[in-house]
Amino acid sequence: MTAIPVPVPAAPAAIRARRRALTRRTLFRLAVAAVVLWSVAPFLWQLSTSFQRDRDLSSVTPHWLPAPGTLEHYRAVFSDYEFGKYLVNSVIVTVTATTIGLLLAALATYALARLPVPGKGMVLAVVLGGEIAVPWPGGTDWVATLLGAPDRVQLGGTGPQAAWALAVLGAPGVVPLADRSAEQLAVLHPDVTLCTAAGTAPAGRLTGADAPTGGAPKQPHAVLEFAAGTPAPGLPGGLPRSSRIILRFMDDGIERDEWFAARSGELARTAAAGLLSGMNGLPEDGTGPADRAWLTGVARTWRDAGLPLIHLELAEFTSVRALRAGCDEYAPLADSVGMSLSELAVLAGPSARTTPVAAAADFATAYHLDRVCVHADGWVLAVHRCDPTEQRTALMTGSLLAAARAAGGAPAADPEPPPAAGYTEDRPADGPVGEGLRADCVPARSRPGDRRAHHPGR
């Protein structure tokens, strides 16, 4: 069964956002071209003069191109000045330095991962976190050989993680999943719902035969996970926050589940909210039009069916350009957008770290959103046009679920604040911010118990 997205006329907000994006990209490319020309011009001039005759070089009138050209200068360099010997010396030094650097870096990486090195905690606290993407079919096996068998195997990604938490709480969501291999189904919570040819069913009742057309097994990724409070030399209280390093060894793309697309309208009529995520899996260069059309078609089907809330959650985009393009392309389809403080600072500038409310309000106004959520290490902020009590309750509930997830390594059915949790008072202030928007912020810092995990996640 195949769902064919039907084009829907873009809303005025979407058109304005696309025009702004086009203008921004055009100005950016012109600026880049000017900088490149300024930087490359001296090199091109040197290259041109190297092929010119001596009398042309000393001429009052500059010669931009060699006419005629000569190789005499290159012959002189190698025959009169032993340039070949100097070139060999440079190659030897460069190769040696690079080899030694890589060797030392590999040894240091192993030591930080496996040994109680003095000062290791401070290093991890500063650099730990983020994502490394390297196309490498054997990457997962290499990580397992280096660090040992994983502690656990589970489904990764914002959408599946949200569905997992909801299933544990007794409110299972429906997720698109094209890969229905036995390995993939085994890491799903049995109550997470998937679409089938006949309707929907809990994942625990399905087999690999219940798969939409086009689904193919994917290579697992590796995730090095460190909980807040993990013991670390040099840090008496352990790591100050939970963090993880994602090692991604292939571009997954989106979960283009055609059964999910076909039932999107039906599901949206009874659902409370829809979550858009995983756009960082789309090609940065704008290719993959079928996947983009599929995703846009699903979101518009939700909107046409009257889904009350569509939330777009940003993720680890590979570049600033990709992050901005993702906002321009998908924020106009959403009512709400969520991001980290780091992502807000990338989009709005470094001042967003000190004035996050103003930056989030500008973002909400630019894309005509009802809500922008920003999460930092110590707090969670919502700049919104909604009921303040509902928003604060939602923020506190999300913080509680996240703290329990960080403490136990998995969603908890009966979450409680960790005993060692601490709550910061240094957070953005609540109150109106203009343009019909209001800011509400709750503390979110927790220091859960000691644990460290390594696992490939799908």
Image (cartoon, helix red, strand yellow):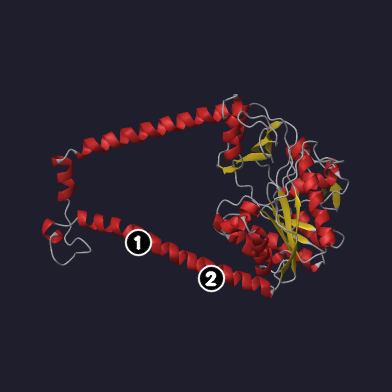
Please give left or right for residue 385 compared with residue 360 in the image. right
**208 in relation to 53, above or below:** above
Residue for point 35% across, 36% down:
94
- Residue tagged by mark 2? 23
Find residue 38 and name its label. 1
**177 in relation to 94, above or below:** below
Q: Crowding near pointer 1: few (<14 within 10 Å), some, many (20+)? A: few
**255 in relation to 360, above or below:** above
What kind of residue is marked 1? Trp
Q: Quadrant of the C terminus?
A: top right
Residue 386 at x, y = what percent?
80, 65
Q: CA distance from mark 1 to mark 2?
A: 23 Å
- Say which quarter of the image contains residue 439: bottom right
Res. 136 in view: yes
**7 in relation to 390, above or below:** below
- Say which quarter of the image contains residue 21: bottom right
